[in-house]
Image (cartoon, rainbow, N blue to C red):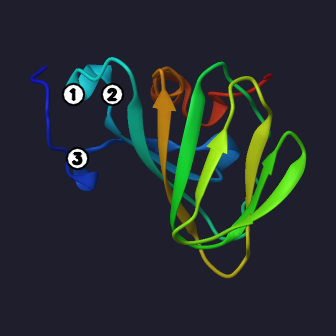
């Protein structure tokens, strides 16, 4: 597969997020672009969705593009909305709950990469039992 330096959202590897809560889109990772130290996704969780709490050894960050919700990091709630960034440390439980008025769309970067591969392989079951 040819490595891409530029990826349109419509060309991303796409699938279903935790328990059917929304859609993930992998734009940049080792497979598609050759990135070795990070991966970049744009995810959308549907209005009213409640995320599944999970954790993984990679640190990652989120940048909210649209929508509002509550991000729980190690059980502590943070209200989030457009133009806000969130850091999730390695091995710390986290999840999003989305307000019922509108979908929540955000960029997520994993460093080092890894969880995006689970999403590509297992889709909505990627982080079960974590």
x and y, in percent, of residue 58 in the image: 59, 23
Residue with the most extreme bottom position: 101
Residue 52 in view here? no
Residue drawn at x 74%, y 27% is 128
Task: Determine whether 13 is above or below 51 in the image.
Answer: above
The residue to which callout 2 is attached is 29
Depth check, front residue: 12 or 112: 112
Find the distance from the CA under tag 3 to the CA under tag 2: 13 Å
Residue mark closest to the camera, 3 vs 2: 2
Find the distance from the CA under tag 2 to the CA under tag 1: 6 Å
Q: Which sits earlier in the primary sequence, circle 3 or circle 1?
A: 3
At numbered mark 2, what does the secondary structure look like: helix, strand or loop? loop
Based on the displayed image, in which of its 4 quarters is residue 122 positioned? Answer: top right
- Packing grade of label 3 (10 A; few <14, some 14-19, many >=20) is few
The residue to which callout 3 is attached is 11
Could you tell whether 111 is left or right of 33 in the image? right
Find the distance from the CA under tag 3 to the CA under tag 1: 12 Å
The residue to which callout 1 is attached is 33
- Tell me, yes or no, whether the two marked residues, 2 and 1, touch with CB atoms within 8 Å: yes
Could you tell whether 37 is left or right of 63 in the image? left
Residue drawn at x 54%, y 72% is 82
- Packing grade of label 1 (10 A; few <14, some 14-19, many >=20) is some
> Can you say which quadrant of the picture contains the N terminus?
top left
Residue drawn at x 63%, y 51% is 86
């Amino acid at each position: 597969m040819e490595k891409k330096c530029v990826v349109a959202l419509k060309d991303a590897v796409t699938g279903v997020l935790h328990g059917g809560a929304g859609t993930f889109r992998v734009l940049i990772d080792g497979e598609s672009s050759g990135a070795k130290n990070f991966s970049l996704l744009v995810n959308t969780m549907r209005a009213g969705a409640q995320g599944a709490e999970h954790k993984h050894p990679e640190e990652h960050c989120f940048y909210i593009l649209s929508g509002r919700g509550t991000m729980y990091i190690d059980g502590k709630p943070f209200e989030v909305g457009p133009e806000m960034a969130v850091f999730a440390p390695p091995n710390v439980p986290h999840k999003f709950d989305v307000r019922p008025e509108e979908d929540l769309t955000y960029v997520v970067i994993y460093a080092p990469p890894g969880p995006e591969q689970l999403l590509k392989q297992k889709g909505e079951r990627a982080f079960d039992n974590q």
